[in-house]
Image (tube, rainbow, N blue to C red):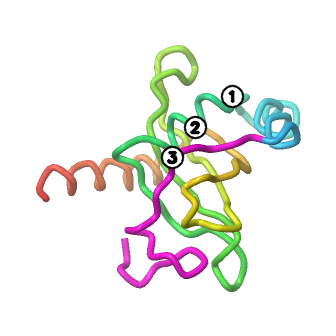
């Protein structure tokens, strides 16, 4: 992670995530992926997305608009996803990232590029 990366002025290395709330709209959004997307999609569950976002080995990146402040993109492991665990990509946001409380926005299965970033982060963590 680039040391200059920040979300709403808070450096990514200082971001703490203790809880994630999922609105009814966000729950409907992630639980109906298969209905909205073309291809082989998996409907997500908020519990899975929360597990992935709270993963100790998660990868955290800024995702968003031109000023890079709309949301965080997290790649993390959910042991419950799909019954036997999956790597997920989860988007969360907060009006006050210092509060440690976040709102869930979306989630999907991680792709190969995400898996590579996650593996690199885990390997890096073992050597710190």
Residue 18 got which mark?
A: 3
7 is within the stretch colored magenta = yes
Range drawn in magenta = 1-22
Is 123 on the left or on the right of 25, as rendered? Answer: left
Label 1 environment density (alpha carbons within 10 Å; few <14, some 14–19, many ≥20) = some
Discs 2, 3 touching: Cβ within 8 Å: no
Q: Earlier in the sequence, mark 2 or mark 3?
A: 3
Is 88 on the left or on the right of 37, as rendered? Answer: left
At 80% from the left and 31% from the top, the residue drawn is: 34
Residue 9 vertical placement versus 38 (above, below)? below
Is 45 on the left or on the right of 124, as rendered? Answer: right
Instruction: Single out the residue that lies furthest toward the left.
Output: 127
Discs 1, 2 touching: Cβ within 8 Å: no
Can you identify the residue that label 2 sits on?
A: 50
Residue 108, located in which quarter of the rendered image? top right
Q: Earlier in the sequence, mark 1 or mark 2?
A: 1
Can you identify the residue that label 1 sits on?
A: 45
């Amino acid at each position: 992670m680039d040391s200059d990366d920040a979300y709403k002025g808070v450096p990514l290395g200082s971001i703490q995530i203790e809880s994630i709330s999922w609105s009814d709209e966000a729950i409907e959004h992630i639980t109906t992926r298969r209905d909205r997307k073309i291809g082989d999609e998996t409907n997500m569950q908020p519990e899975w997305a929360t597990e992935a976002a709270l993963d100790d080995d998660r990868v955290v990146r800024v995702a968003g608009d031109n000023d890079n402040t709309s949301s965080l993109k997290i790649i993390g492991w959910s042991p419950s996803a799909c019954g036997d665990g999956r790597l997920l990509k989860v988007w969360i946001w907060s009006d006050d990232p210092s509060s440690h409380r976040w709102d869930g926005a979306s989630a999907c299965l991680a792709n190969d590029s995400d898996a590579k970033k996650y593996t690199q982060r885990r390997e890096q963590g073992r050597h710190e």
